Amino acid sequence: MTDGVTTTQEFYTRYAALYDDIARRTPGVRGLRRAVADTLDPDPGDVVVEMGCGTGANFPYLRERVGPAGTVVGVDFTPGVLAVARRRIETEGWENVHVVRGDATRPPLDDADTVLATFVSGMLADPAAAVRTWAELVGPDGRLALADLARTTRTPFAPLNLVFRGLVRASSPPGTRTMSGSPTDILDSRLVAAHRELENQCEDVRRETRALGFARVAGGRVRSRR
Ligand SMILES: C[S@@+](CC[C@H](N)C(=O)[O-])C[C@H]1O[C@@H](n2cnc3c(N)ncnc32)[C@H](O)[C@@H]1O
């Protein structure tokens, strides 16, 4: 593993409890997570794999969609966030939710009906390649969904981009603060790459912008290969 990966894992392990609060309680975030689950639109009984699942903030919404016959599997490479997710699964008694430690760009699974990743594209060196891998995993007719943050393009809220820039810098693992280009520029370009690849891989794509334009949600059905 590269140093950047180790730094990211140390960062998310150190702040796992704080991240969990932010991920579940920030105003508007519940609506956003529900919107992602709706956009993913899994069928009851599906196997849903969440790449970079963190502390499992999406799990309740995914469980609701797949029902008792379905399965939710979270993949993350950071031990600290997985520990929080495991505790929640145990406390809630969710028998159809599991977490696996692994690299989302090389998923440690060989089958899934649907894949989602929320707030992860910006952390991947090659997000388009990851989206292609996820499309292959679910196969034709499988479903993919992404949600990511980037600067807003809605003019009335554009002044808030300065605040967003500060928040991104403060919440970026240390390694990313010294990379060429600002963390916000990197986040924006990775979001574009991931969402463009989702458009390439999928049909019936649904797109939505939330949180004053800072959150982009997209999902669709993987095209059949000809
Ligand atoms: C910003 S958090 C998002 C967590 C969760 N998806 C959510 O919506 O709250 C990003 C997560 O992605 C994980 N992550 C980043 N790159 C990863 C990779 N290549 N493989 C697995 N997990 C990764 C980090 O460990 C972290 O838990």
Image (spheres, rainbow, N blue to C red):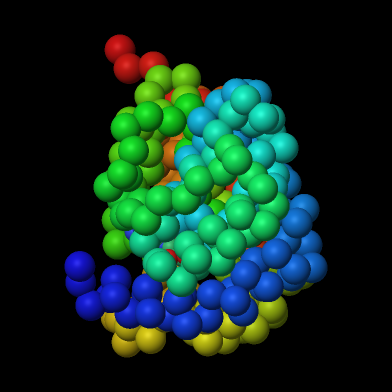
Report the front residue among 26 and 189: 26
Name which quarter of the figure residue 162 lies in. bottom right
Q: Nearer the viewer, residue 178 or 73?
A: 73
**Percent position of residue 104, x then y:** 36, 51
The quadrant the N terminus occupies is bottom left
* 46 vs 212: above or below: above
Quadrant (top left, top right, bottom left, bottom right) of the C terminus: top left
Residue at 29 percent across and 71 percent down: it is 5
Residue plotted at (40% across, 20% down): 140
Please identify the quarter of the rendering in which residue 151 is found.
bottom right
Quadrant of residue 220 within the rendered picture: top right
In screen coordinates, is 107 left or right of 50?
A: left
Q: Position of residue 181 (x, y in %)?
A: 35, 79
- Residue 225 visible to an observer of this rendering: yes
The residue depicted at 67 percent of the width and 48 percent of the height is 93
Residue 188 seen: no
Vertically, is 116 above or below 185? Answer: above
